[in-house]
Image (cartoon, grey):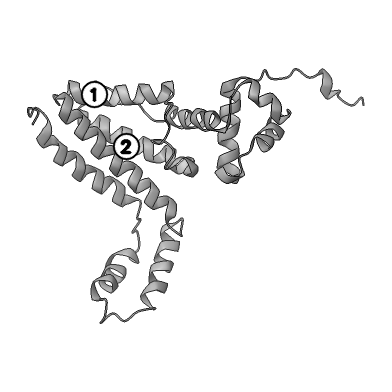
Amino acid sequence: MKQRDSSLEPRIPLTRERIFQAAVVLADERGIDSLTMRALGEELGIEAMSLYHYVANKDELLDGMVDVVFSEIELPTVDVDWKTAMRRRAISTREALARHRWAVGLLQSSTSPGPANFRLVNAVLGCLRAAGFSVENAVHAYSAQDAYIYGFALQEKTLPVDTPGELAEAAESMRRQFSADEYPHIAETITEQVTKPGYDFADEFEFGLDLLLDGLERLRGAADA
């Protein structure tokens, strides 16, 4: 049987989009600190210098990667009530950040937002405005939601455990390190909540999100200050 000549196989054209997608995969698998032009070039089967024909530098690469993450977030629509739309967007954002842990902290730091970022921001503001929020209050509502979503995602990223079982074990281990008489409320929380079967810290996200959205309801229809 003849060996296939790989040189005769069609090469997938190199594009900025393909570079960004490959960089996202690389960061997901190895961590953002492992992402270098050399490593990315090896992943794509090209010389690192060839990448500079498509991206000017590492910052532009990171901007493109961030926009890939934004493109995975569900855009809110006006065909459902605003709370449902905002809730879906928030959950979708958290899920995207869970898939791409390296992106937490980068999504809002770019000085060169991409088209997916603009589409999301415009859709969120448009949904809030259609729901009756004034321009000023739409900005308040947008900022409050993003602070909560990204803050929770960052908290999840820094947790030393990944599963409810691991969290329960870590909490129980911590409880054994101090006296319940000295820290009674922490001990109570661990024994009565965190280590109970079925407790999942991830559930706290939607609980807090609903509280936030209920609070923002007061701004809807209110005049600017």
Q: Which quadrant, please, contains the C terminus? A: top left
| Left or right side of 111 for 43 | right
Q: How far across and down, in percent of the image, does residue 139 sit?
A: 22, 30
Does residue 178 lie above or below 196 as drawn? below
Instruction: Look at the numbered disc 1 and give the secondary structure of its residue.
Output: helix
The quarter holding residue 220 reads: top left
Q: Of the two numbered discs 1 and 2 on the same chain, state the one appearing first in sequence.
A: 2
Name which residue type carries label 2: Ala
Q: CA distance from mark 1 to mark 2?
A: 13 Å
Q: Is residue 144 left or right of residue 218?
A: right
Q: Residue at x 55, y 41 (%)?
A: 28
Q: Against 112, is 103 above or below? A: below
The kind of residue tagged 1 is Cys
Asked whether residue 144 is in view, the answer is yes
Work out whether 201 lies above or below 87. below
- Mark 1 sits on what residue? 127
Q: Which mark is residue 90?
A: 2
**118 in relation to 153, above or below:** above
**Residue 93 location (% of width, % of height):** 37, 36
Closer to the camera in the image, 93 or 47: 47
Q: Quick one: 198 or 75, which is closer to the camera?
A: 75
